[in-house]
Amino acid sequence: MTIGYQYIALVVAGVAAICWGLPAAHRLKPPFDSAAALVVLAGVVAAVTGVLLTIIPGFFR
């Protein structure tokens, strides 16, 4: 079993987006709070995709 180490950066970027976006979604005024919430959503998608591709490199093939 191989591990896709190149996708760890995707996990880190996703977690960073979540860590920034969660407090920002509550701190910023509209409409910027909605943009921060979308960043959180994109971070979750990036982190989950990165974990899948790190653990199972050929997951989407």
Image (tube, grey):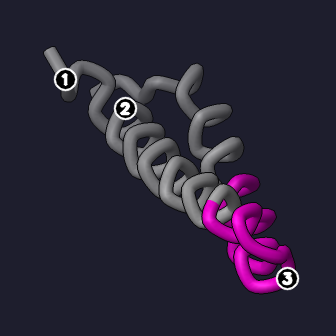
Q: Earlier in the sequence, mark 3 or mark 1?
A: 3
CA–CA distance in space, label 3 to label 2: 33 Å
Q: Give the range drawn in magenta.
A: 16-34
Kind of residue sitting beneath label 3: Arg
- The quadrant of the rendering that contains the N terminus is top left
Give the residue at the far bottom of this rendering: 26
Give the residue at the far left of this rendering: 61
- The quadrant of the rendering that contains the C terminus is top left
Disc 2 and disc 1 in contact, CB within 8 angstroms: yes
Q: Earlier in the sequence, mark 3 or mark 2?
A: 3
- Based on the picture, tell me whether residue 19 belongs to the magenta stretch: yes
Disc 3 and disc 2 in contact, CB within 8 angstroms: no
* Residue located 67% across and 32% down the image: 9
Return the residue nearer the eye: 55 or 52. Answer: 52
CA–CA distance in space, label 3 to label 1: 37 Å
x and y, in percent, of residue 5 in the image:
56, 26
